[in-house]
Image: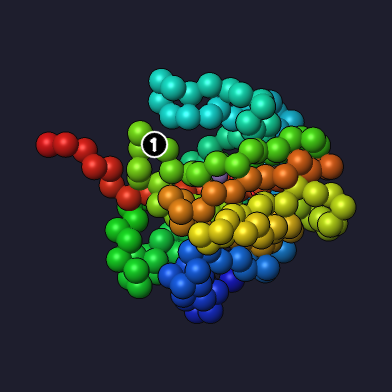
Amino acid sequence: MPNTTDSPLLPRIVDELAEHGWSRQGLFLPSALTAALAQECRRRAQAGQLAPAAVGRGGGQEVREGIRGDLTQWIEPGQADCCDAYLALMDELREALNRALYLGLEDFECHFALYPAGAFYKRHLDRFRDDDRRTVSVVLYLNEAWQAEDGGQLRLYLGEQGAAHDVPPEGGSLVVFISSDMPHEVLPARRERLSLTGWFRRRGNEPF
Ligand code: OGA
Ligand code: MN
């Protein structure tokens, strides 16, 4: 674990998010923690715990391979030390975002995602039409020695004109963006592609 309270990366992420709506840190995690998380993801996959991801929310959920082909499993506190270390770090990022940008982020949900070779996730927004709690999206990549020819880039559509910017899913790197404003997609990968994908959420607008 890095000494997270002194980490210069958190304020940098906050500033870039405020200025550009997204941020990428090439080396966010020490390689030992990235490796432990990758191993945990593969262990769960081999144990058959990852399931085809659904599209939509609540009763409207369905698995549509034409839209996304990844397998996922939510992580919960207390399951593995490496996951707990990552959740602790995300809590620091949540607090830093709240302090600087008054986002009122209340919690963090995240899942392992495994894209088998050939899988992709078509262009989408992370905020659901019927649930606007997802506010900031965070993707940590777990792929060792990822090469350009392996594909699998995260394509962000930036700005009004929607210029495409491709991010390679390199192990230990982190991408953060505003969930409601950033259309994005995952291009097909030529080898298995692992990530931990999460969302900071605000309190919902429940009527009372
Ligand atoms: C998602 C997603 C991006 C990535 O799971 O919603 O867009 O690079 N993931 O894995
Ligand atoms: Mn997404």
State the residue in front, 202 or 64. 64
Task: Residue under label 1, please give it.
Answer: 129
Image position, residue 130 (x, y; %): 35, 34
- The quadrant in which the C terminus is found is top left
State the residue in front, 32 or 170. 170
Q: Residue at x 54, y 49 (%)?
A: 183
178 lies left or right of 188? left
In this picture, is 50 found above or below 203? above
Q: Residue at x 84, y 49 (%)?
A: 150
Figure disc tally: 1
Instruction: Say whether mark 1 is within 8 Å of ligand 2.
Output: no
Image position, residue 145 (x, y; %): 83, 58
State the residue in front, 171 or 87. 171
Q: Is residue 164 visible?
A: yes
Q: Residue at x 50, y 69 (%)?
A: 20
Q: Where is ligand 2, by quadrant?
A: top right
Q: Residue at x 35, y 45 (%)?
A: 133
Q: Secondary structure at mark 1?
A: loop
Q: Is residue 5 visible?
A: no
In this picture, is 70 found above or below 27? above
86 lies left or right of 96? right
- The quadrant in which the N terminus is found is bottom right
In this picture, is 73 found above or below 26? above
In this picture, is 60 found above or below 132? above
Indicate the quadrant where residue 25 lies: bottom right
Image position, residue 161 (x, y; %): 56, 59
Q: Label 1 is placed on what type of residue?
A: Arg
